[in-house]
Image (tube, grey):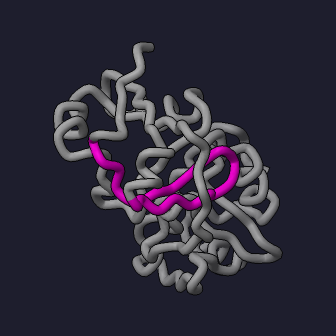
Amino acid sequence: MMNKKKRDKCSKFMSLILRHKPQDFGIVLDKGGYCPIDDLLMVFQNDDYWKEATKEDVLQIVAECPKQRYETKGNMIRARYGHSSQKIHYEMSKPPAILYHGTYEGAVDSIFKEGVKKMNRKYVHLSETTHFASLAGKRRGSFVLLKIDCSMAYLLGVNFYYAGNEVWLSDDIPASCIEKVEV
């Protein structure tokens, strides 16, 4: 078994493979964004640094990931929340009245003019709690927490999808549905 530090590095490598560049590693994702865990392990075992990785290591990374980025189903694994190179489809759902979005100060002016956009992702990522939203927003500088009026957005025709673990995905959110939260 890998130590925690190496598992953290391995998680980032898994993210590169499953979320961003599966084709660069010979990984083929099915229509749900899954690939066999054994295929992922083959990538690891072809790299001197990761060749000791085991299925147990992968499962431990999935279980311990604070952002719950990965999901397993039987002997298959995928990146969650629509990050895969292909769009993962979730069932549309009516969202809670309020959700949160974490971002950074440099994006705020644009967000209040144009709304929250998917940008280079497949969906806008939202959270039921301020804690999970803050994990996403603190990556790029001064953290800003936004409150999303999902009831209004839903009435305006925005589609929402529940991805599990307090995470919601959506189409672009109009600026009129966004409010800055003082933290």
Up-down: is 13 above or below 131?
below
Answer with left or right where residue 161 lies relative to residue 115: right
Q: Relative to 43, does residue 65 appear above or below in the rendering?
A: above
Tell me where residue 98 sits by quadrant. top right
Residue in front for this viewpoint, 158 or 23: 158
43 on left or right of 108: right
**Residue at 69% across, 48% down:** 165
In the image: residue 162, left or right of residue 16: right
Specify the segment rendered in magenta. Answer: 157-175
Please report the residue visible at 75 percent of the width from the left and 56 percent of the height from the top: 57
The image shows residue 88 at horizontal and vertical percentages of 53, 73
Quadrant the C terminus occupies = top left
Confirm whether residue 109 shows in the render: yes
Q: Decide whether residue 169 is among the magenta residues.
A: yes
Q: Where residue 129 sits: x, y (%)?
A: 60, 32
Q: Nearer the viewer, residue 88 or 174?
A: 174
36 vs 120, nearest the viewer: 120
Relative to 26, is 144 above or below? above
Say if residue 10 shows up in the picture. Answer: no
Residue 15 part of the magenta-drawn span? no
